[in-house]
Image (spheres, rainbow, N blue to C red):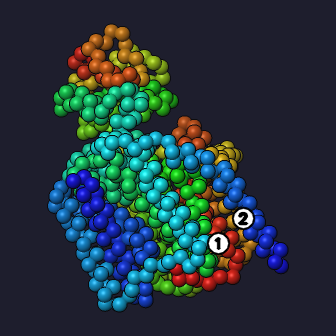
Amino acid sequence: MRWLLYLHFSLWLALFAVFIWISAPIVGSAVVENRIGPAETNCSVDTYLRGLTGIEHGSEKLSEAFRDLGKEGRLIVFVRNENDQSEFLGMMIGYLSWPREVQIVKVPGETVDKELANIQPGAVAGVVFCSVNPPAWLQNRVRLGSSIVLVPVTQAAP
Amino acid sequence: MIVLGLIAALFTIFIAGFGITILVFARADRINVIECACLGWLFGCGTISLFLWVCGTFCSGLLLQAIVALGCLVFGILGWRAKRESKAKFDLPKPANVAEWILGGIIAIQIAILIFVSFKHTLGWDGLFNWELKARYAFQNGGTIPAAYYSSAGRAFSHPEYPLGIPFTELWLYLWMGEPNQFWVKIIFPLFYAACALLLAMFVSRLSGKRWLGLLTAALLPFVPSISASPGGTVVGYVDVPLSVFYLAALGYLLLWFRTDDSRFIIVFAACSALLPWIKSEGIILWAVLVLLGFVLGLVKRRLVQLVASIAPGLILIFAWRVYLRVVHLLPQSDFVRPSFSTLGNNLGRLGDIFAILFAELSQTFQWSIFWLIAAIGLIYLVASRKLERIALASAVVIPILLYSLTYVFSSWPSYTAHMTSSVPRLLLHVMPAGWLAIGLALSGAKREIQTL
C-alpha cells in the first residue's frame, strides 16, 4: 500500500503549494506596506485623523478644542448614516472627548437643519459635524481639519 | 523610561504566568521551556487582567499597581519553590535534524516579522474603540473603568458589555509605562501569535508523534492572510487572535488529557477554557463547545468528576461578569434579540442567506487563501478515522462555525446580512488555529503515540 502513502503526501503537498501560491503575494504585500512611525502616545489616533481630515497631532488639537468648551455640557456629534468615514470620525470624537457625555446623531443627508433645531442649548457644550455640512446660518465655526467642524453651543443656538 | 516600564510590565506578566504554569507542571520530571513560556504568557495575561479587575473594586492608582505586582511576584515565588522542591528540570527541546532546524528557524523569523509589522500598523477600528478605549479610560481613572462609562449612551459603540481580558492587559502596560501609549501596546498581539504558533507546533507534535509535522503546521499558520494581513488579524489589535489561542490551548490540552489521563492537562484545560469568556463575549460559545466535547470525552474515559471540576472556573467567571455588569448598571444593548422559539420560527427563513454568506466567506481567497478547503479535507480524514479523539477535534472546528452562523437568526440589526458580513470573518478566525491542528493530525495518519516535545 505504499502508493497510497505517496498519494496521501502528494495530495497534501499540492494543497499546501496552492495555498502558499495564493497567500504569499497577499501576506507579502501586507508585510512590506507602511513604515514604522514615531513611538508616540496617540500614534493610531493621529494617523487616522491625519488621513481622514488632514490634521497633524489631531488627538492633541481636538482634546484642546473640547477642553475649551468648559467642563459642563454634552457634545452633540452629527455623522452621516451609512458613511463609514463619518461614523468613524464621530466615534473618534466620542473617544477623545471623555469624560464629557456625547450624543452621536446619525443623519441621512449632508445637512442637518431639522435635527439641529431640536437641540436644547442649556445641556449642550458644543455641536460637532463629521463629514456633515453645518447649516449656512450657523456662525463661529471652528474648523478642525477638512471633515470636522466644531461649533460651541452658545453660538450654535439659532 | 517608557520602554523600561514596558519591559517591567511584560516581565511581571511572565513572572505570574510562569509561576502558575510551574505550579501545575512541577511534579513532572521535566518542564518544557517553550510550553512554559506560551502558557506563561496566556496565564499571565489572564491573571493580571483578573487581578486588576478584582483589586480595582477596592483600590486604585499606585496602590492597585503595587498590589497586582506583588500578586505576580507571589505566583512567581510559589512556582519557583514548587519547582525546587520537586526537583523538576527545565528542558529546551532542540530540533533533531536539518528539516526541524529549518522549520524552527522559519517560525522564529515569522514571529520576528509579525512583531515588526505590528509596529507598522495602527490599531484597527475595533482594536481602538472596543478594546484600547477601555484601557485608556481605566488608566485615566487610576486603573479602574469609571462607572459613568457603562451608562454612557454616547459610547455604546465601544461595547461596554465586552469583557476586560485584553483591555486590562493593555492597561497593565499603560500603568507601567506611565501613559496610554498606542505604539508600544501593540506588542501584546504578536506575543499571542507567538504563543499560538508554538502551542500549535507542540500539540501537533505530541498528538501525531512527529515533531517535523508540528513545525510544518506552525510554519504554514501565518500564510492564512486573515491572521497576518487583514483586518481582524494580529497586527491591528483585535482580540480575535488572542481568543483563538486560548481556544487552541484549551482544546489541545483537553485532547492530551483524553490521550494520557494526566491530570495536569485537565488543569490547564480548565484555566484556558475559563479565560475564553474573559477575552470576548463569543468566548462563551467556544467554552460551551469545549464543555460539551469534554463531557463526551470524560464520559468515555469515566473521568467525569475531573471534567466537572474543570468547568467550575469558567462558570464562576461568566457569572461574576454578569453580576458586575448589573452592578455597574450597564445600559441594555445588544446586537441580538433574546432567543425564543417564536423569533426562531419567524426568522428561520434567514438560514438560506446565512449559509450562502458563510460559504462565500469560507471561499474568499483574499482572506483565507484555500485554508478552508484544506481544513475541510483534513476534517474528512479525521471523521473517516472513526477515532473519538479525532472526531472530537473535527467537531471543535465545525460546531463553533455552525453556532456562530445560527446566532444571526437572532440578529437585531436592520440588515442581518450586513451584520454577518461585517463580523463573520473575525469569528472564523477563532477556530482557524484549531483547524490547523486538525490538518496536522489528518496529515499524520492514525497510529501514533505521544512524543514528549
Q: Which residue is located at x 43 percent, y 69 percent?
A: B38
Residue at image point 66% right, 77% down? B388
Mark number displayed over residue B441: 1
Q: Is residue A118 above or below residue B214?
A: above
Measuring 26% from the left and 50% from the top, which residue is drawn there?
B138
**Marks 1 and 2 belong to one chain:** no
Q: Would you place residue B35 above or below residue B159 in this image?
A: below
Amino acid type of disc 2?
Trp
The label on residue B232 is: none
**Frontmost residue, B281 versus B242:** B242
Question: Subunit of mark 2?
Answer: A
Observer able to see residue A137: yes
Instruction: Kindly identify which residue carries mark 2.
Output: A12
Q: Percent position (x, y) of residue B199?
A: 50, 69
Secondary structure of residue under mark 1: helix
Residue B56's x, y, as percent? 23, 59
Disc 1 crowd, CA 10 A, few/some/many (<14, 14-19, 20+): many
